[in-house]
Amino acid sequence: MKLRSFMILSALSFGGFAFLSWQSVQLPYSMPEAATQGKQVWQAYNCISCHTVFGNGGYNGEDMTHIVSKRSSKELLNFFANPPVMRPNHKLLHPKVSPEEAQNLVQYFNYIDKIPTLGWPPKARKSGEST
């Protein structure tokens, strides 16, 4: 009797766990096709090696999590069309992308800007400033 109760309770617990895990990975709304293609451009050009999204990535470039809140789509498209010299070496140009790839990147940035980040990235503080 105890073994049967244990098995039933274990099966129900596992089923509940599996269901809740499946529910938690579902996006609240689907990612638009252009944003998906923008993410693929982001990955193809290895942008994460210099830039950060949601706290992951390199720190040479700007955090791109909320870049569309700081710069307009037109500014971003112009940036991708006329890439500047990259810091810190001042020898290489920022990778140039096609107009379609640039538009898809901007759509990707628009998508990730709408994801609640609970205050990420943190505000910059001056040296010696207390929290």
Image (cartoon, helix red, strand yellow):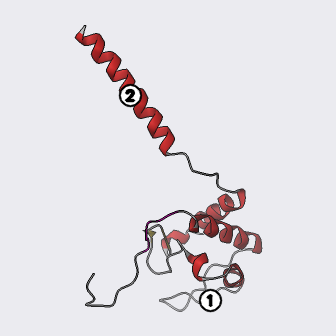
Return the mark for residue 66. Answer: none
Secondary structure beneath dot 1 equals: loop
Q: Please report whichever mark, 1 or 2, sits nearer to the chain's N-terminal start.
A: 2
Cβ atoms at labels 1 and 2 below 8 Å apart: no
Nearest to viewer (mark 1 / mark 2): 2
Mark 1 highlights which residue? 84
Badge 1, how many Cα within 10 Å: few under 14, some, many 20+?
some
Return the mark for residue 14. Answer: 2
Q: Is residue 71 left or right of residue 12?
A: right
- Residue 70 in the image, given as x and y percentages of width and height: 58, 82
Vertical placement of residue 39 versus 15, above or below: below
Rendering quarter of residue 59: bottom left
Residue type at the position of mark 1: Pro
Rendering quarter of residue 81: bottom right
The structure residue drawn at horizontal position 62% and vertical position 89%, both measured from the top left corner, is 84
- Residue 28 in the image, given as x and y percentages of width and height: 58, 51
Q: Is residue 55 left or right of residue 43?
A: left
| Magenta stretch: dominant secondary structure | loop
Secondary structure beneath dot 2 equals: helix
What are the residue bounds of the magenta stretch?
116-121
The one nearer the camera, 31 or 8, is: 8
The one nearer the camera, 92 or 121, is: 121
